[in-house]
Every structure is written in structure tokens, then in C-alpha cells.
Image (cartoon, rainbow, N blue to C red):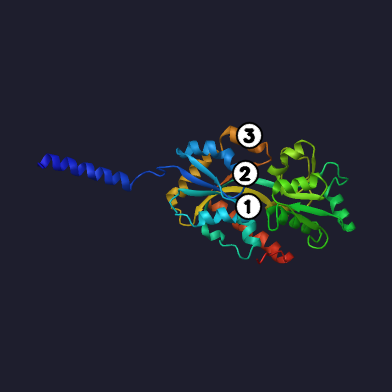
Amino acid sequence: MNKTKFISALAAVTAFGTTAVWAEYPERAVNMVIPYGAGGATDISARTIAEPLGNAVGKPLIMANITGAGGATGSVAVQNAKGDGYTMMFARVGSHSVNPAMKATLPYTLDDFRFVNVYEINPAACAVSASSDIKSMDDLVAKTADGNVTYSSSGVGSFPHLASAMVMSEFGVDPINDVTHIPQKGGGAAITAVLNGTATFVCTNSSSLASFVGNKQLTPLLVTTAEPVVGFDAPTANDLGKDSLNQLVGWTGIAGPDDLPDDVATKWGEWTATAVNDAKFVEAMEARGSVIRLMGPAEANEFIQGQYNVFRALVDKLGMRIEG
């Protein structure tokens, strides 16, 4: 090989090597784990933001519902994934605030994930059937004296389970002895139980209740925010002097394994900031009672850890820790 050809070949090899080493993330599609089933609050949030987020990322987002164990199965799949940014998840209040607080044998902790953001807040709301004679929290609390008040949830150790217990406790009602928990198989079933009279009330995220409240099938008694929630004609926790309930909110954010690189985390922050400004996304989520609020990594981690601490203290106080 003459000198000219050798130099040209060397340059080509060097260029290829540089491209391979310094390839811009992402080079390919990104797997996005949704740790809950189709049609739930997490799934709706994830699939609503998928289009604007995918446009910002510039590569396909492959949505995968990996369900089971109250969000734990999908979370473990991400926990064990390579921290290269090609397996991310839509973390949720149940999977990453309630589960760690309530389940002693959970195979992960908050430290096993890197939360790059929280982008959606779902205020909790308590509601009864529109046909119920209960029209306020005072009515509900008074009725517990009869010993016949029940509440439904999507399962033992779920967010609605803990939410109902926390609300009752704040209003001076013993959630273990004064009311009866009736767990159901899923959030939809929990709401149905109230609609058909199997349960007296349900406390869950506003996005799950919004359509039923809008259709006048459910009457909201309380929202856990400082400010009113669009579509919910009900007093706020602050209106009722229970501002400690402001911590009781659902949320959705994006997380990866704990060894996710800084530059990858930064990019997800930028992409999500673009996605949450999409008018179609905002309109769709607000119509479901969600509040679009973007928290960066530091704020998101502080928020999630703070919520976990509140939930864990309540669980310990009420003896709700699940050992199995």
C-alpha cells in the first residue's frame, strides 16, 4: 500500500472509531416500562406523553406494561437493567412511595433508581356515590360512629388503601377499627364498588375519579391540595384545616437504574421539559384532573423522599406494615 492510500485508510478507521466511541445517545429506540396495567392512571399518563416525548427524544419509545406486585415487578425489571438509558420507566407514587413505605420484603429501595423528573401531580380525592346521603367530610366522619362505613381500594398496600387510612386518621377516625377496608382487584373495581354500594367511599388520585365526578356519578368530598382542582367542586384539605394532607398526592415521573449517567439524565430532563409544554398533552391531562408540574432531579428526589417519610411514619403509627 502506498503512503497516500495508507493515510486515507487510517483516517477512515480513525473516523469510524471516533463515531463508535462518541455516538450520540440515543442511537436506537428506548424501552419505557409502565409498571401497571393498561387503562390505569400510570398507563394513561405514559401513553398521553408518549408522542410529544418521543418527538423530543428523536427515537421511538417502546411502551411495555410490565405488571404485578403493585408496580414492583416492572420496577425490578428497570432496577436490574443496564444503566445506559435504553431501559427507563414511568415511576409512580404506588411503586416508589407507597410500596417502599408499606412492604417490608420489597426487593428494591428508592436508592436503586435515579429519578430524572416528576412531571405530573394527581391530587388525591375522596368520593362517595352521588346517591349517598353523605355530602361532606363531616357527614362521613359522623357516620363512622355507626360502625358501618367501608372503603374500597385497588388492593392491600395500594395508594388508595394508604390514602384512605391517612385521611381518616387526620379526621380523628381510627382507620383500622372504625372503618372497614374492602380491597378490590384494581382501581377501576375500587370505584365500581362505591358506585354499586359495596363500599361507602374511596380515596384515590383525581385522574381516576375525574370522569365519574364529571358525569355526576360520584360526589367528591375532599381534594388534598391547597388550591381547588378543576372539575372537583369540593373543599381542599387546606379549606378544612388539614394541610398535612397536601403530601398525599399521586405523581408520575421518569426514572432509570441508579447508575444512569449524568449526561443521559440531563437529556431526559430537557426532553420532558419540551414534552410537558405540548398543548395537546396538557389539555388531555388537565381534563383528567391532573396538574402538570415539572420537577428536576433534585426537587423530584426531595419530593419523593419526603413523601416516603410521611407515608412510612403513618404506616408505623397505624401498624400497617406488610411483612410478607
Is the Cβ of the residue at disc 3 closer than 8 Å to that at disc 2?
no
Whether residue 228 sits left or right of residue 31 in the image: it is right
Helix or strand or loop: what does disc 2 sit on? loop
Q: Are marks 1 and 3 in contact (CB under 8 Å)?
A: no
Looking at the rendered structure, the secondary structure element under dot 1 is helix
Look at label 2 and name its amino acid: Ala
Residue matched to label 2: 38
266 vs 161: above or below: above
**Label 3 to label 2: alpha-carbon separation:** 21 Å
Q: Position of residue 137 (x, y in %)?
A: 83, 50
The kind of residue on which mark 3 rests is: Glu
Circle 3 residue: 283
Q: Quadrant of residue 302?
A: bottom right
Residue highlighted by disc 1: 93
Pointer 3 local density, CA inside 10 Å: few below 14, some 14–19, many at least 20: few
Q: Identify the residue at the far top of this view.
A: 280
